[in-house]
Amino acid sequence: MSTSEKINIAVVIPCYNCSETIEQCINSVFTQSFQPKEIIVIDDGSKDATIEKLNKLKELCPPNIKFVVLQQENSGPSVARNKGVAAASTEWIAFLDSDDYWEKRNLEYFDQFIKEHENFVLVGGGKVERFEEIPFKKLLFKNFFQTSCTLAKKDIMEKYKFNERQKYSEDFRSWLLIAEHHKVCRIPGMLALEVKPDVRNGLSSKLWKMEKGELSNFWYLRKKKSISLPSFIFVCSYSYIKFLKRVFMQYLSK
């Protein structure tokens, strides 16, 4: 790819009862230094003023960006993200949660990196000091990919869809499956911030359900013989120790 040629990106945003946060979330996409080709918002059966806010935001959308609002009965974020990926007409998908927002240059960092490293199909950001390729075996021990700081190829996400029957750690399963067969990495620059941490209904507070989701990912990999029995036992044990540590730290913070 020529360094002067820009990649085309669709931003996929699942939302549910997010009227308090969706404006700052989407405005952070409108004001990106590198603007996406599409913004696809999937409302997951909201019962508050989310749809009204989205309709107003659609009127404010820059003319060079296609703004699409899809609606579905409440089915969960995995169904919503998969629907958004399917609706995108771009080669790349950037994910953003409705209670997060981006710093101004997030998509610019993605664009600059992809033009020079075409062999990666999944790129993550966050609090990263340097470029780091993440091998499958390393990813087993830690999820390095925050969904709101992740860019992936559309065809890859269509092949490794989010598990719609899984509510917790379903994104981690997709990242693991991708890393098993393709090159994935993290790069510095991108950062997703919480709009209002105090109003989040985030999954981070549901530690045991998240842990069960992570363990189910390892069991799935074991069943498909992606990891050996000793590796399965080891990563599950390591995961459970991390869970106990998080519970202990949460207890101390009270």
Image: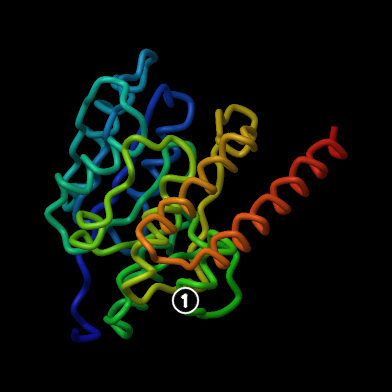
Closest to the observer: 103 or 127?
Answer: 127
Point out the residue furthest to the top here. Answer: 47
Q: Viewer-proximal residue, 221 or 93?
A: 221
> Considering only vertical position in the picture, is 221 above or below 246?
below
Name the residue at the right extreme.
252
Residue occupying image coordinates x 23% and y 24%: 72
Label 1: element kind: loop
- Picture coordinates of residue 189, whole percent (x, y): 50, 69
At a point 24% along the width and 46% down the height, the residue shown is: 39
Residue drawn where x is 31% and y is 37% of the image: 164
Q: Is residue 18 left or right of residue 79?
A: right
- Tally of numbered tags: 1
Residue 191 locus on image (x, y percent): 52, 59
Q: Residues within 10 Å of mark 1 (few under 14, many from 20)?
A: some
Q: State the image quarter where residue 82 is shown.
A: top left
User: Is residue 99 rendered to the left or right of residue 66?
Assistant: right
Classify residue 161 as left or right of residue 220: left
Q: Position of residue 206 (x, y in %)?
A: 62, 33
Instruction: Specify the amino acid type for callout 1.
Output: Pro
Q: Can you say which quadrant of the picture contains the N terminus?
A: bottom left
Position in image of residue 28 (x %, y %) = 41, 48
The residue indicated by pointer 1 is: 135
| Residue 154 vertical position relative to residue 135 in the rendered view, above or below | above
Horizontal side, residue 215 vs residue 33: left or right: right
